[in-house]
Amino acid sequence: MSAPRRAAVIGHPVAHSRSPALFARFAAASGIALAYDAVDVLPEELEATLARWRGDPAFVGCNVTLPHKERALALADRAEPAARACGAANVLTRDGGALVAGNTDVAGIEAALAKYGVALRGARVAILGAGGAARAVAEAARRSGAAIITIAARDASRAAALAADFGAGACTLGAVPVADVYVNATPAGMQGQPQISLLPNDAPAGAAAFDLVYVPEETVFLRDARARGLRTVPGTAMFLAQAAATFEKWFGIAPPLRMMTTR
């Protein structure tokens, strides 16, 4: 029996990630020997960590979560169009001795919204957050034909910088305009993070609220939105879709549909 291939999810923090269990199921169902770990990497350790993996022939790639998505793109040897378009990478793939940056978050966002019947075309989209995940949402909104995209962050300068890349508006979290779709692209509500909802007080009933956080599955943001009559899209839908796309990218095999669960 051949030695297992190696892969990982990297972030800080990363202990909450369900990627190791999910990829273990994907690999077992596909007959692939894979050792997949969650690796907590401090920002100052990222470059050295990737350098080690770049030279490991057993290493197939890694998923990238906060706060490393933008830096991972900068450190990669090459970048696929989706990663270049949104300025962030959620997956690195080893190709020979090179690391190739990709982004399956954008497709995962589109798949999640489609599953729950939420259209971005012609919509007013408010993105809460200005990091790598927010970049993927902005790219999904742009290429889907959203009418208005607004980036909201505590730091107005960060919001403005991201907005400039996508022809979007920018504001602070306290000045979010009324929208048709609200997306939480911050860690707020994540396990181990502040349990708060960033949904604006004037979010109208009937609008959609999409939380990229998937642990816990039922977040404060989603509960708040549902109680106020908004349609909700859980982060699990996006997590599963981007993970399946990553697995297919690495191994050329689409995971069986029965594996598409976080448990």
Image (spheres, grey):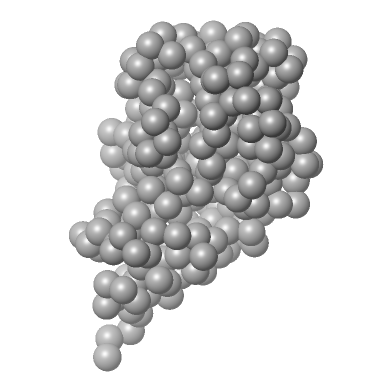
Q: Residue at x 39, y 59 (%)?
A: 260
- Percent coordinates x, y for residue 182 in the rendering: 56, 23
Q: Residue at x 25, y 59 (%)?
A: 254
Please tell me whether residue 113 is drawn above or below residue 157 in the rendered image.
below
- Percent coordinates x, y for residue 215 in the rendering: 62, 52
Q: Residue at x 59, y 26 (%)?
A: 230
Which quarter of the rendering shows the N terminus? Answer: bottom left
- Percent coordinates x, y for residue 207 in the rendering: 54, 20
Is 123 left, or right, of 208 in this rendering? left
Is residue 120 in view? Answer: yes
- Image quarter for residue 80? top left
Please tell me whether residue 253 is drawn above or below residue 232 in the rendered image.
below
Please tell me whether residue 2 is drawn above or below residue 204 in the rendered image.
below
Please tell me whether residue 153 is drawn above or below residue 112 in the rendered image.
above
Q: Nearer the viewer, residue 214 or 170?
A: 214
Q: Residue at x 69, y 31 (%)?
A: 227
| Residue that extends furthest to the bottom in the rendered view of this protein | 1
Q: How many marks?
A: 0
Q: Nearer the viewer, residue 234 or 204?
A: 204
- Percent coordinates x, y for residue 217 in the rendering: 60, 50
Is 188 left, or right, of 134 in this rendering? right
- Image quarter for residue 140? top left
Is 234 left, or right, of 29 in this rendering? right
- Image quarter for residue 248? bottom left
Q: Nearer the viewer, residue 70 or 111?
A: 111
Is residue 6 in view? Answer: no
